[in-house]
Amino acid sequence: MEEKIKHILFLSSWYPTKRKPFLGNFIQRQAKLFSSKYKVTVLHLTSDNNLKSLETVISEEGNLKEIIIYHPKGRNIFSKYFFLKKAFKEGLKNIEAVDFIQGNVLFPKGLQFSWAKNYFKCPLILMEHSSAFHLSKGQKLSFKDSFTLSRVYPKVDGIIAVSEILKNELQPFFVQKPIFTLPNHIDSVKFKLNKKKKDKETIEFLHVSTLDERFKNPKGMIDACDILIKNGVNNFHFTIICDEDYQNWELYSKKLNLSDHITFKGPFNWSEVASFYQKSDCFILFSTYETFSIVLAEAWSSGIPTITTPVGIASNLNNELGISVEKNNTNELATAMEAFISGKKTFDAEKIKLYAERFSEKEVISHYDSILQSLTK
């Protein structure tokens, strides 16, 4: 007799919607990946200022069912809670019994994780991606986040962090709870090794992010290009892809007369971005903080070396994968770029690609299956 496949309910504070089509797109991709082995139902609740009643959108593809419920925003904390709870109850009408609940990103909508646990009476896994637990000395969670944590903590059976760095940051908040690590996955078919012409006259650098000033340091990357030009190094081009508004950074680049060397593009969907990796020689990440950084894994899967700060999965960078530079050290970034342009640093694309296999769909789903099994022993 064929074994019935497990049914996983995905809840998330972040998920693509018609208003924010890129928010939490990596969570949506994970839901699609897991649906290749499990039955996955996604329930996502999101407010809409223009609504006076609930609006439900349901889509199904294979073993994946997505339920997006748009609800009125509410004018105060009480009405906001009322509409969120109402939307959650509406969503339950479209969900069959589940075997596991995976709550993605605790803040700000994590209360629904505990509601689901109370309703379905099955194991609850919290998978955390955000920087919310990255607190400087003396910093504390806000009252609202502390309240959410206090309600969800007793219900959680296990936590998944996307990196060892995030795991270490979660441990003080989830004492005596098992914490596993599971990397984000990449599409190893789309992000494939591409043979590039050697001895190119112009080196192509690439960066992909939201350009969030708090963490991504876009100014530092642009300033590093300015340093190169002033030092007489001009045989390079830097493509910056962003799914948010990048106008201010484009204007800053023009102010420094870098328009011939820096091009801003985007937004693009995930599959479209892959082609830019194929055209690039090196990927740059100059962040001050990352919980994971999927773009590094995508670069490595494409056989592309990286110049990166020691963040996320590059916290202890293997020197076969690229060059590590100090956070906020723009001169060091420029020096690393110049070393790459001049050919002083070379890398083996095949070895880089091989390293990236740990982020492949096959490896990630196998690891996830082990985690689920450990929670049912």
Image (cartoon, rainbow, N blue to C red):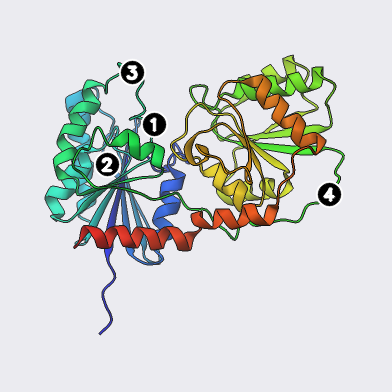
Q: Nearer the viewer, residue 273 or 135?
A: 135
Q: Choose the circle earlier in sequence order: 2 or 1.
A: 2
Q: Which residue is mark 2?
A: 54
Q: Are circles 1 and 4 on residues that touch, CB within 8 Å?
A: no
Is residue 95 in view? no
Q: Is residue 196 above or below residue 48?
A: below
Where residue 226 appears, as percent x and y from the top left, is: 74, 19
Q: Is residue 311 above or below residue 252?
A: below
Q: Choose the circle earlier in sequence order: 4 or 3.
A: 3
Q: Which residue is mark 3?
A: 137
- Distance of mark 2 from mark 1, alpha carbons? 31 Å
Residue furthest out toward the bottom: 1
- Residue at (29% x, 32% y) in the render: 108
- Distance of mark 4 from mark 3, alpha carbons? 48 Å
Classed neighbour count for the residue bearing mark 1: other residues with Cα under 10 Å, few (<14), some (14–19), many (≥20): some
Q: Are circles 3 and 2 on residues that touch, CB within 8 Å?
A: no
Q: Which residue is mark 1?
A: 131
